[in-house]
Image (cartoon, helix red, strand yellow):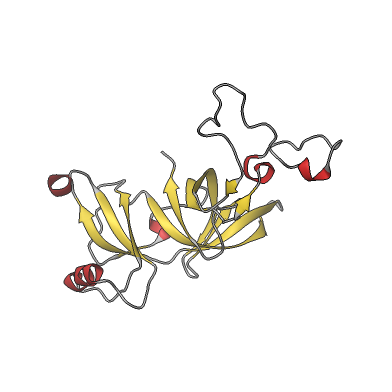
Amino acid sequence: MISGFLVKKGQMTSVFTPDGKRVAVTKCRALPLKVTQIKNIEKDGYQSVQIAFDSKKRLDKATEGKISKLKLDIKPRFFQEFKLTSDQVPEIGSDITIESVFQNGEKIDVTGISKGRGFAGVVKRHGFKKQPLLGASNYVRRPGSIGAQTPGKVVKGKKMPGHYGVETTTTVGLEIFSINPETNEVLIKGSVPGSFNSWVTLKKRS
């Protein structure tokens, strides 16, 4: 099938294994994904499956023309491609469910947009150690020296205060605890990057 899937992040909770062990999991909603295009080596130079996800009220002209040509009754907000992992090629307009891509206990990598934290200092942003609690209290969380007399400038890439968060973040080695096809719900062991109700990408480990 395909190498990944898109789910909507929910809240964290805890569940119990059959042997009574408590496990922290993240609830995610995994609705079926609609196939909108099949790319092949002859025409495109590579093999992949394009899927549509999310929805909006009005489509731009390019997307509306593409959807009307395919005769699909959807109004997708985004498109994404996944590599083919088998000889089984889905048909355009068909639905791909998460149980056809992943299994319980499978290791995955999860990619999402991290939460925004605004303007942050070096202690919060980069994990700097605090300065000694000896002098003025308003200097405890400051970065201290940011360079020497030579070369007489701040070196490019110096860790400084600034905007923190809203970056593409990947958490590797998570595990699918369970998949419920009836409720379209998947439980993932551990915490998943991103805010509540944000879209995250699950990918098979290479």
Closer to us: 80 or 117: 117
Left/right placement of residue 39 relative to residue 138 reads left
The total of numbered circles placed on residues is 0
Examine the image and state in which quarter residue 134 appears. top right
Please report the residue visible at 52 percent of the width from the left and 34 percent of the height from the top.
Answer: 157
Please report the residue visible at 59 percent of the width from the left and 37 percent of the height from the top.
Answer: 159
Q: Is residue 106 visible?
A: no
Residue 193 lies, with reference to residue 156, above or below; the image says: below
Left/right placement of residue 190 relative to residue 39 reads right
Q: Residue furthest right?
A: 134
Closer to us: 131 or 76: 131
Examine the image and state in which quarter residue 76 appears. bottom left
Residue 69 lies, with reference to residue 20, above or below; the image says: below
Residue 200 % position (x, y): 47, 56
**Image quadrant containing the C terminus:** top left
Residue 96 % position (x, y): 34, 61
Q: Residue furthest left?
A: 42
Residue 17 % position (x, y): 65, 54
Residue 147 lies, with reference to residue 24, above or below; the image says: above
Left/right placement of residue 101 relative to residue 176 reads left
Residue 87 lies, with reference to residue 93, above or below; the image says: above
Closer to us: 156 or 43: 156
Q: Is residue 124 visible?
A: yes
Closer to us: 58 or 53: 58
